[in-house]
Amino acid sequence: MRSPIRITEVGPRDGLQNESGIVGVEAKVAFIDRLSEAGFPEIEVTSFVSPKWVPQLADASEVLGRIRRRPGTIYSALVPNERGLERALEARVDKVAVFTAASESFARKNINAGVAESIERFRPVAAAARAAGLPVRGYVSCAVACPFEGPIAPSRVAEVSHMLLDVGVDEIDLGDTIGVAVPGDMDKLLAAHSTVTSPERLTLHLHDTRGTALACAWRAIELGVRSFDASCGGLGGCPYAPGATGNGATEELVYACEGSGLSTGIDLQTLLDAGRIISAALGRALPSRLLKAGTLVPCGKLTVPTGAVAKE
Ligand code: HMG
Ligand code: MG
């Protein structure tokens, strides 16, 4: 229970892909640079997908070319096909992520291919990425439910994870794309994966649409998972998943972990600064409650909102 928690910040990718107004390169770079200063082991910076499908991330190469890279941070990006990988390699990413789903309908809406077809498409992508020395993450979306098909059986999710591992991905990331999971779903998902992969090779990507992301993350921590995605400010969602809102806010996960003696290596105050930068660029408040809670005071290694201190 006490080993460190690894958090991948996905705000610049999952967070911004869902914004309809185009955010300028300069604001994206300022956001990512401040996230780097917060000390993340990994930041998912952007996607090398078709700009016709996600216009917001058409500037992927420029953003990667302009950020200040912090030694110790892995700068990763989504790639849907070989064309995406070529672009990602030119932009000198450190790691790539391929993405499919446990739901046939969602895979078709999101990447215009069935599940099995998409995974075959990833085989040469994974081989070329590994030949270039890059690790490969494999996302399984709709790991709990699909916006078009409803609940998805954990055994089906595990089957898709197995198929991804078979084409050469290094780690599996299970996405609760539309934020429906409850803590008991974590038990079922992990039990279904027990013969497919170890908790050490699993990441959980929990959207917070129904306010359950942190409770689910906590249950997964109890079950041995140590790697999570989260989004600064709680930004995000998938433009091809109706009703999806952002991932659990990173600062709320950091706050819960650090306050409970689980190290994340992330500086909370710098992370909150990053949230303010992107909130200003978007011209609106973000969903994160911790970001709204206001003034900070130092509290041991951690900084916590004054409100929380006053209640103690
Ligand atoms: P398609 O239309 O079937 O592909 O899309 P295509 O091969 O026919 O190409 C269409 C056009 O896009 C062509 O251009 C290609 O050259 C171009 P045209 O000839 O018409 O001018 N193209 C590209 N351009 C740049 N980079 C590329 C690329 N590929 C094709 N890589 C495709 C298939 C997969 C490309 C498309 O469906 C796509 O890009 N989908 C991405 C959708 C997306 O990004 N969704 C959000 C991310 S997933 C997510 O959020 C879930 C996650 O967070 C986990 C969770 O929450 O569960 C990860
Ligand atoms: Mg997502």
Image (tube, rainbow, N blue to C red):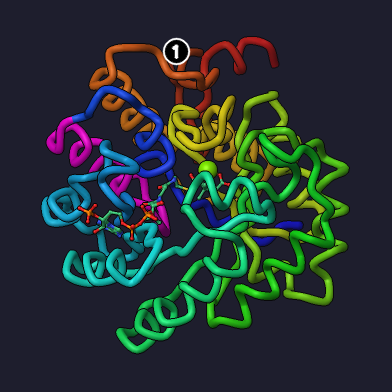
| Residue 234 on the magenta span | no
Q: Residue at (35%, 63%) from the top-left corner? A: 74
Q: Residue at (53%, 51%) from the top-left corner? A: 264
The span picked out in magenta is 24-45
Is residue 4 something that shows in the picture? Answer: no
Residue identifier under label 1: 294
Q: Residue at (46%, 73%) from the top-left corner? A: 121
Q: Amino acid at mark 1?
A: Gly
Q: Residue at (84%, 53%) from the top-left corner? A: 153
From the viewer's perspective, is 255 left or right of 82?
Answer: right
Q: Residue 73: x percent and y percent? A: 34, 61
Q: Nearer the viewer, residue 50 or 75?
A: 50
Determine the image quadrant of residue 26.
Answer: top left
Question: Looking at the magenta stretch, what is its main secondary structure?
Answer: helix
Q: Nearer the viewer, residue 95 or 41?
A: 95
Quarter of the figure with the C terminus: top right
From the viewer's perspective, is 238 left or right of 219?
Answer: left
Quarter of the figure with the N terminus: bottom right
**Extreme residue toward the bottom, this view:** 131
Determine the image quadrant of residue 239.
Answer: top left
Q: Is residue 278 above or below residue 89?
A: above
| Residue 37 on the magenta span | yes
Is residue 62 something that shows in the picture? Answer: yes
Disc 1 residue crowd, few under 14, some 14–19, many 20+, Cα 10 Å? few
Q: Residue 113: x percent and y percent? A: 51, 58
